[in-house]
Image (cartoon, grey):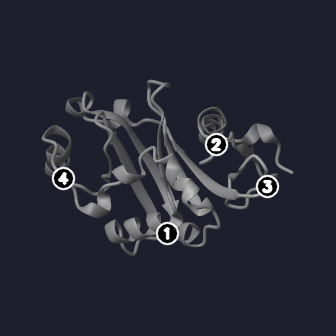
Amino acid sequence: MQPIFTIHAGEYLVGSYIEQSLTDPNGNKLNVWIPSKDTGVDFLITDRSNTKTISLQVKFSKDFLITHGRPEYQERLVSCGWWTLNREKIVNSEADYWVFVLHTFNAKNMQYVILTPQQLIQRLDSIHPATKSLQTYLWVSDDSRCWETRGLKKKETDELILRNGNVPKDRDFTEFLNNWDAIFTKWA
Protein backbone atom coordinates (compact mmCIF):
# COMPACT_ATOMS: atom_id res chain seq x y z
CA MET A 1 0.00 0.00 0.00
CA GLN A 2 1.29 3.44 -0.94
CA PRO A 3 1.35 5.86 1.99
CA ILE A 4 -1.16 8.70 1.79
CA PHE A 5 1.64 11.22 2.23
CA THR A 6 2.72 10.66 -1.37
CA ILE A 7 -0.27 12.30 -3.02
CA HIS A 8 1.00 15.14 -5.16
CA ALA A 9 0.03 18.79 -4.90
CA GLY A 10 -2.55 18.61 -7.69
CA GLU A 11 -4.31 15.70 -6.05
CA TYR A 12 -4.39 17.55 -2.75
CA LEU A 13 -5.79 20.70 -4.42
CA VAL A 14 -8.49 18.78 -6.29
CA GLY A 15 -9.48 16.70 -3.26
CA SER A 16 -9.67 19.78 -1.04
CA TYR A 17 -11.67 21.70 -3.63
CA ILE A 18 -14.18 18.87 -4.03
CA GLU A 19 -14.64 18.42 -0.30
CA GLN A 20 -14.99 22.14 0.40
CA SER A 21 -16.81 23.47 -2.65
CA LEU A 22 -18.75 20.81 -4.54
CA THR A 23 -22.08 19.20 -3.85
CA ASP A 24 -24.01 16.65 -5.87
CA PRO A 25 -27.04 17.73 -7.94
CA ASN A 26 -29.19 17.35 -4.79
CA GLY A 27 -26.97 19.72 -2.79
CA ASN A 28 -25.27 17.01 -0.70
CA LYS A 29 -21.55 16.98 0.10
CA LEU A 30 -19.41 14.44 -1.75
CA ASN A 31 -17.08 11.75 -0.45
CA VAL A 32 -13.52 11.61 -1.79
CA TRP A 33 -11.66 8.30 -1.81
CA ILE A 34 -7.95 7.79 -2.52
CA PRO A 35 -6.77 4.42 -3.89
CA SER A 36 -4.07 2.49 -2.05
CA LYS A 37 -2.05 1.96 -5.27
CA ASP A 38 -1.66 3.69 -8.63
CA THR A 39 -4.25 2.31 -11.04
CA GLY A 40 -4.59 5.37 -13.26
CA VAL A 41 -7.39 6.70 -11.09
CA ASP A 42 -6.36 9.24 -8.47
CA PHE A 43 -9.76 9.75 -6.81
CA LEU A 44 -13.06 8.04 -6.53
CA ILE A 45 -15.85 10.51 -5.82
CA THR A 46 -19.11 9.21 -4.42
CA ASP A 47 -22.43 10.68 -3.45
CA ARG A 48 -23.37 10.81 0.23
CA SER A 49 -24.81 7.27 0.17
CA ASN A 50 -21.78 5.90 -1.74
CA THR A 51 -24.02 4.50 -4.49
CA LYS A 52 -22.94 6.76 -7.38
CA THR A 53 -19.30 7.07 -8.37
CA ILE A 54 -17.04 9.20 -10.53
CA SER A 55 -13.35 8.48 -11.05
CA LEU A 56 -10.76 11.20 -11.66
CA GLN A 57 -7.22 11.27 -13.00
CA VAL A 58 -5.39 14.43 -11.89
CA LYS A 59 -2.54 16.18 -13.71
CA PHE A 60 -0.78 19.12 -12.07
CA SER A 61 1.41 21.87 -13.48
CA LYS A 62 3.17 24.74 -11.87
CA ASP A 63 2.55 28.11 -13.46
CA PHE A 64 5.02 28.81 -16.27
CA LEU A 65 3.65 32.29 -16.95
CA ILE A 66 6.16 34.16 -14.79
CA THR A 67 9.24 32.14 -15.76
CA HIS A 68 8.52 31.40 -19.43
CA GLY A 69 5.73 33.78 -20.43
CA ARG A 70 6.44 36.80 -22.56
CA PRO A 71 6.21 40.11 -20.61
CA GLU A 72 3.42 41.44 -22.83
CA TYR A 73 1.30 38.40 -21.90
CA GLN A 74 1.64 38.89 -18.14
CA GLU A 75 -1.41 41.16 -17.79
CA ARG A 76 -3.73 39.09 -19.99
CA LEU A 77 -3.01 35.57 -18.76
CA VAL A 78 -3.80 34.05 -15.39
CA SER A 79 -1.81 30.84 -15.73
CA CYS A 80 0.15 28.73 -18.22
CA GLY A 81 0.51 25.01 -17.59
CA TRP A 82 2.70 22.44 -19.34
CA TRP A 83 2.24 18.67 -19.34
CA THR A 84 3.85 15.70 -21.00
CA LEU A 85 1.17 13.10 -21.67
CA ASN A 86 1.26 9.57 -23.01
CA ARG A 87 -1.27 8.99 -25.79
CA GLU A 88 -1.69 5.30 -24.90
CA LYS A 89 -2.44 6.12 -21.24
CA ILE A 90 -5.16 8.54 -22.28
CA VAL A 91 -6.72 6.08 -24.73
CA ASN A 92 -6.68 3.26 -22.15
CA SER A 93 -7.64 5.42 -19.17
CA GLU A 94 -10.24 3.97 -16.85
CA ALA A 95 -10.90 7.35 -15.25
CA ASP A 96 -14.22 9.01 -16.06
CA TYR A 97 -12.58 12.45 -16.15
CA TRP A 98 -9.13 13.97 -16.32
CA VAL A 99 -8.57 17.12 -14.29
CA PHE A 100 -5.70 19.43 -15.22
CA VAL A 101 -4.74 21.68 -12.33
CA LEU A 102 -3.15 25.01 -13.21
CA HIS A 103 -1.58 26.50 -10.15
CA THR A 104 -1.38 30.26 -10.24
CA PHE A 105 0.81 32.57 -8.23
CA ASN A 106 -2.42 33.75 -6.66
CA ALA A 107 -3.35 30.67 -4.62
CA LYS A 108 -6.98 31.80 -4.48
CA ASN A 109 -7.21 31.61 -8.25
CA MET A 110 -6.65 27.91 -8.97
CA GLN A 111 -7.79 26.83 -12.44
CA TYR A 112 -9.10 23.38 -13.39
CA VAL A 113 -9.67 21.91 -16.85
CA ILE A 114 -12.09 18.97 -16.60
CA LEU A 115 -12.81 16.63 -19.50
CA THR A 116 -13.24 12.96 -20.34
CA PRO A 117 -10.27 11.01 -21.68
CA GLN A 118 -12.24 10.62 -24.93
CA GLN A 119 -12.64 14.40 -25.27
CA LEU A 120 -8.98 14.89 -24.41
CA ILE A 121 -7.61 12.39 -26.93
CA GLN A 122 -9.94 13.63 -29.66
CA ARG A 123 -8.63 17.18 -29.18
CA LEU A 124 -4.99 16.15 -28.90
CA ASP A 125 -5.24 13.84 -31.94
CA SER A 126 -6.54 16.78 -33.93
CA ILE A 127 -3.86 19.19 -32.68
CA HIS A 128 -0.85 16.84 -32.42
CA PRO A 129 -1.50 13.78 -34.61
CA ALA A 130 0.82 10.77 -34.57
CA THR A 131 2.84 11.85 -31.55
CA LYS A 132 3.30 9.20 -28.85
CA SER A 133 4.56 11.57 -26.16
CA LEU A 134 2.39 14.66 -26.16
CA GLN A 135 3.67 18.01 -24.95
CA THR A 136 0.67 20.20 -24.24
CA TYR A 137 0.28 23.75 -22.97
CA LEU A 138 -2.96 25.01 -21.49
CA TRP A 139 -3.20 28.77 -21.04
CA VAL A 140 -5.94 30.54 -19.09
CA SER A 141 -6.79 34.19 -19.72
CA ASP A 142 -8.05 36.82 -17.32
CA ASP A 143 -11.46 36.70 -19.04
CA SER A 144 -11.84 32.94 -18.32
CA ARG A 145 -10.86 31.52 -21.67
CA CYS A 146 -8.59 28.51 -22.05
CA TRP A 147 -6.54 27.32 -25.02
CA GLU A 148 -4.07 24.61 -25.93
CA THR A 149 -1.19 26.59 -27.42
CA ARG A 150 1.65 24.13 -28.01
CA GLY A 151 2.95 24.57 -31.55
CA LEU A 152 1.30 27.91 -32.26
CA LYS A 153 3.56 30.50 -33.89
CA LYS A 154 4.42 33.78 -32.17
CA LYS A 155 2.14 35.66 -34.57
CA GLU A 156 -0.76 33.33 -33.66
CA THR A 157 -0.27 33.64 -29.89
CA ASP A 158 0.08 37.42 -30.20
CA GLU A 159 -3.21 37.54 -32.09
CA LEU A 160 -4.86 35.33 -29.50
CA ILE A 161 -3.54 36.99 -26.33
CA LEU A 162 -2.96 40.61 -27.29
CA ARG A 163 -5.84 41.13 -29.73
CA ASN A 164 -8.49 38.71 -28.41
CA GLY A 165 -8.21 36.61 -31.54
CA ASN A 166 -9.55 33.14 -32.05
CA VAL A 167 -7.94 29.75 -32.35
CA PRO A 168 -9.22 26.66 -34.16
CA LYS A 169 -12.12 25.02 -32.28
CA ASP A 170 -10.05 21.99 -31.27
CA ARG A 171 -7.60 24.29 -29.43
CA ASP A 172 -10.34 26.11 -27.50
CA PHE A 173 -10.69 24.40 -24.10
CA THR A 174 -12.87 27.12 -22.56
CA GLU A 175 -15.89 24.82 -22.25
CA PHE A 176 -13.84 22.56 -19.94
CA LEU A 177 -12.43 25.36 -17.76
CA ASN A 178 -13.68 25.05 -14.16
CA ASN A 179 -16.68 23.09 -15.44
CA TRP A 180 -17.19 20.88 -12.41
CA ASP A 181 -20.86 20.34 -13.31
CA ALA A 182 -19.70 18.15 -16.20
CA ILE A 183 -18.66 15.36 -13.85
CA PHE A 184 -22.25 14.86 -12.74
CA THR A 185 -23.52 14.04 -16.24
CA LYS A 186 -22.61 10.42 -15.49
CA TRP A 187 -25.09 10.48 -12.60
CA ALA A 188 -27.99 11.84 -14.67
Residue 121, horizontal then vertical, whole percent? 45, 68
Is 61 situated above or below 168?
A: above
Q: Mark 4 sits on what residue?
A: 166
Marks 2/4: CA–CA distance: 32 Å
Marks 4/1: CA–CA distance: 24 Å
Q: Mark 1 sits on what residue?
A: 118
Whether residue 133 can be seen here: no
Residue occupying the point 52% across, 62% down: 116
Marks 1/2: CA–CA distance: 21 Å
- Which label lies toward us, 3 or 4? 4
Callout 4: SS? loop
Q: Sequence-wise, which precedes: disc 3 or disc 4? A: 3
Q: In terms of depth relative to the viewer, which is nearer, 42 or 188?
A: 188
Q: Mark 3 sits on what residue?
A: 37
Quadrant location of residue 150?
bottom left
**Left or right of 65, for residue 18:** right
Q: Give, as a three-letter code, the residue at label 3.
A: Lys
Q: Sequence-wise, which precedes: disc 3 or disc 1? A: 3
Callout 1: SS? helix
Q: Mark 2 sits on what residue?
A: 11
Residue 154, horizontal then vertical, whole percent? 18, 48
Residue occupying the point 39% across, 65% down: 124
Q: Sequence-wise, which precedes: disc 2 or disc 4? A: 2
